[in-house]
């Protein structure tokens, strides 16, 4: 009986034609020990036939042929062709972009890139004591151009229209294009309406930036006080300059992405944050200021004068409630920012004040007890002194010290002054602030002249007693007169709101002396004085006139006068000091009482109403009469 035979094929490794001997032996051993049977069920002896098998190249031993990929050579070739074409296309496109069409894509990239732009900050406002705006800001545009973007074939008509809207010759615009090829400012502070018309022209390369323009709602009324800013926004005069550090804004910068037409498409945040300016509030009262300006303007025009100035000071706090000059200008019109109208005459102009100085001479003599209000002084119209002759406008005869003030006697003031030492008078003048610039922060403030007392001769001491040989500004006079409104104390002046309780005055005269002198000042405005035109119905008024010749380098100019008046209202319970001066009035009425007295009265009447100061005497018709001269 033949023995059934089962053959097994053992696969070898990729590195050998036959499987290892140890592996074959283990297989035979395993199967000879088995009870497995063939088809006949007979016991069998296993026979293993090891057949040589060559492994395919690049196939690992553990990879089975059942899952091996079977890719045709044609399909592989097709895929490789397509991939080669794609890579070749990318290479050609890259070459085209980098070499052939490089400038086009650089321009496209530059049209949508990051830019650092300015962020305009708003300058602080200036307001009066009640919050009325005296200086503020309005939005405007600055027009600039990138000359590289201007088409060479730009329509000439558009350039002409652009020039017309900018108010510039077309040749000037093209010259700017040629001078700078990167960035040119065409015009600052263009109104929004004109800027919109420029934008509608659609000229490539023309751009706009938002900025601020300073606006002065009160125009010429407050011009010299408020001042103005320059084209860059910095203060150049008045409060704008004095408070520039506070009012001034600090522009910032931020990073943005612009599109090709200049529009911001994404804000990437601040680089440097903008800092707006701080608002400034003045002590100025807008209503009193308006009254002062109108009254002053009328006086200058009616007297055919060269100029005039007025200032209103709170006698207790030193706050400046009004400061006016005429002629004036509109600071909103930059073409007018030149000439003598810009001068803040209240602060800058110094002059010989004349008889306005007499109350100080008398006050010092009373304080030193050299005279009393009832002391008698002989005048007799002329008084020879050291080769010179001092005169009065009339023969007043024998006057009391109070009468010297009421009649404004030069001879009386001279004789009173000569009872004192030059050093005593000089110390008083300097204590009152004469010869020193007022501490207001204004540029160009006048200092005036008070010569050292050691160089005085008797004639100089005499003339200074009645306002010649010494020069002062109107603001210095108003400041000095606060001693009569504040019981002998000189209070510091302030353009800004001040707490009365914090004001510490400097004692110049005794309270008793200033009380006596206030009575003398009241007689000046009463019947028989030199300024009845300064009377204000319902209120007690006191003050002093001054009419002085105008000094030139060649001596005094005849028929050229400085007509002034400084008054206190109410004189019995002082509140305000008002000083008015008109330069070179023409005509028969050129005296301080005639020209400046009515200006004082008009300003004072408005101020009493605005400040709600109650009348201190019955309202009656003014006892007008022809005033005495001086």
Image (tube, grey):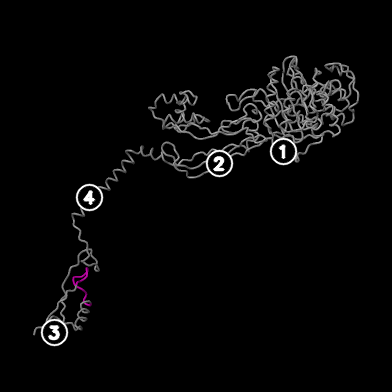
Mark 1 or mark 2, which has the lower sequence index? 2
Q: Is mark 3 on a helix, strand or loop?
A: loop
Q: Residue 498 carries which label?
A: 1
Q: Is residue 625 visible?
A: yes
Label of residue 81 in the image:
4
Is residue 556 rendered magenta in the image?
no
Give the CA separation, mark 3 to mark 2: 106 Å
Q: From which residue to which does the magenta span run? A: 11-22
Position above or below: 610 against 459: below
Q: Which of marks 3 and 1 is in front?
A: 1
Q: Is residue 77 above or below residue 199?
A: below
Looking at the image, tell me whether mark 4 or mark 1 is earlier in sequence order.
4
Element class at badge 2? loop
Q: Are marks 4 and 1 in contact (CB under 8 Å)?
A: no
Q: Position of residue 460 (x, y in %)?
A: 82, 22
- Residue identifier under label 3: 42
Mark 3 closeness class: few <14, some 14–19, many ≥20 residues within 10 Å: few
The quarter of the displayed image where residue 200 is located: top left
Are the two marked residues, 3 and 2, in contact with CB atoms closer than 8 angstroms? Answer: no
Image quadrant containing the C terminus? top right
């Amino acid at each position: 009986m033949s023995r059934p035979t089962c053959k097994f094929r053992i696969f070898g490794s990729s590195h050998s034609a036959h499987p290892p001997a140890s592996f074959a032996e283990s297989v035979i051993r395993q199967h000879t020990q088995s009870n497995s049977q063939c088809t006949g069920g007979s016991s069998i002896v296993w026979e293993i036939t090891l057949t040589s098998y060559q492994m395919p190249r690049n196939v690992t031993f553990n990879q089975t042929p059942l899952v091996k990929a079977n890719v045709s050579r044609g399909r592989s070739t097709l895929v490789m062709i397509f991939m080669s074409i794609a890579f070749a296309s990318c290479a050609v496109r890259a070459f085209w972009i980098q070499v052939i069409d490089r400038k086009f894509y650089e321009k496209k990239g530059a049209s949508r890139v990051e830019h650092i732009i300015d962020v305009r900050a708003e300058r602080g406002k200036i307001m009066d004591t009640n919050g009325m705006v005296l200086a503020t800001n309005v939005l405007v545009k600055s027009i600039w151009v990138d000359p590289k973007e201007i088409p060479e074939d730009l329509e000439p008509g558009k350039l002409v229209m652009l020039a017309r809207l900018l108010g510039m010759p077309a040749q000037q615009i093209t010259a700017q294009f040629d001078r700078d090829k990167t960035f040119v400012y065409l015009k600052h502070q263009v109104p929004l309406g004109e800027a919109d018309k420029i934008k509608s022209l659609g000229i490539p390369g023309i751009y706009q930036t938002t900025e601020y323009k300073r606006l002065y709602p009160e125009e010429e009324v407050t011009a010299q006080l408020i001042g103005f800013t320059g084209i860059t926004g910095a203060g150049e005069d008045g409060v704008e300059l004095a408070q520039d550090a506070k009012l001034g804004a600090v522009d910032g910068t931020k990073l943005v992405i612009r599109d090709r037409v200049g529009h911001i498409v994404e804000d990437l945040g601040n680089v440097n944050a903008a800092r707006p300016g701080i608002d400034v509030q003045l002590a100025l009262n807008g209503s009193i200021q308006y009254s002062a300006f109108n009254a002053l303007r009328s006086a200058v025009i009616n007297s055919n004068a060269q100029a005039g100035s007025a200032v209103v000071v709170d006698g207790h706090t030193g706050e400046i409630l009004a400061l006016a000059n005429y002629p004036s200008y509109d600071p909103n019109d930059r073409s007018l920012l030149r000439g003598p109208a810009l001068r803040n005459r209240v602060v800058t102009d110094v002059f010989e004040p004349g008889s306005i100085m007499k109350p100080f001479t008398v006050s010092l003599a009373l304080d030193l007890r050299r005279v009393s209000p009832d002391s008698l002084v002989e005048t007799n119209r002329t008084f020879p002194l050291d080769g010179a002759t001092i005169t009065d406008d009339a023969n007043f005869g024998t006057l009391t010290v109070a009468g010297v003030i009421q009649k404004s006697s030069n001879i009386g003031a001279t004789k009173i002054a000569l009872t004192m030492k030059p050093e005593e008078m000089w110390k008083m003048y300097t204590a009152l602030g004469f010869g020193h610039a007022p501490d207001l922060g204004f540029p160009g403030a006048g200092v005036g002249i008070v010569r050292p007392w050691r160089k005085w001769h008797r004639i100089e001491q005499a003339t200074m007693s009645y306002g010649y040989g010494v020069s002062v500004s109107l603001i210095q006079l108003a400041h000095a007169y606060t001693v009569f409104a504040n019981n002998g104390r000189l209070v510091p002046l302030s353009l800004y709101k001040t707490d009365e309780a914090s004001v510490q005055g400097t004692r110049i005269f005794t309270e008793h002396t200033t009380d006596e002198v206030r009575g003398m000042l009241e007689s000046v405005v009463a019947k028989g004085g030199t300024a009845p035109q300064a009377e204000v119905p319902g209120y007690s008024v006191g003050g002093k006139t001054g009419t002085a010749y105008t000094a030139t380098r060649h001596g005094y100019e005849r028929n050229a006068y400085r007509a002034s008046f400084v008054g206190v209202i109410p004189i019995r319970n002082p509140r305000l000091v008002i000083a008015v001066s008109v330069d070179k009035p023409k005509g028969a009425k050129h005296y301080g009482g005639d020209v400046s007295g009515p200006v004082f009265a008009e300003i004072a009447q408005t101020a009493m109403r605005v400040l709600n100061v109650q009348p201190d005497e019955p309202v009656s018709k003014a006892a007008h009469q022809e005033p005495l001269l001086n």
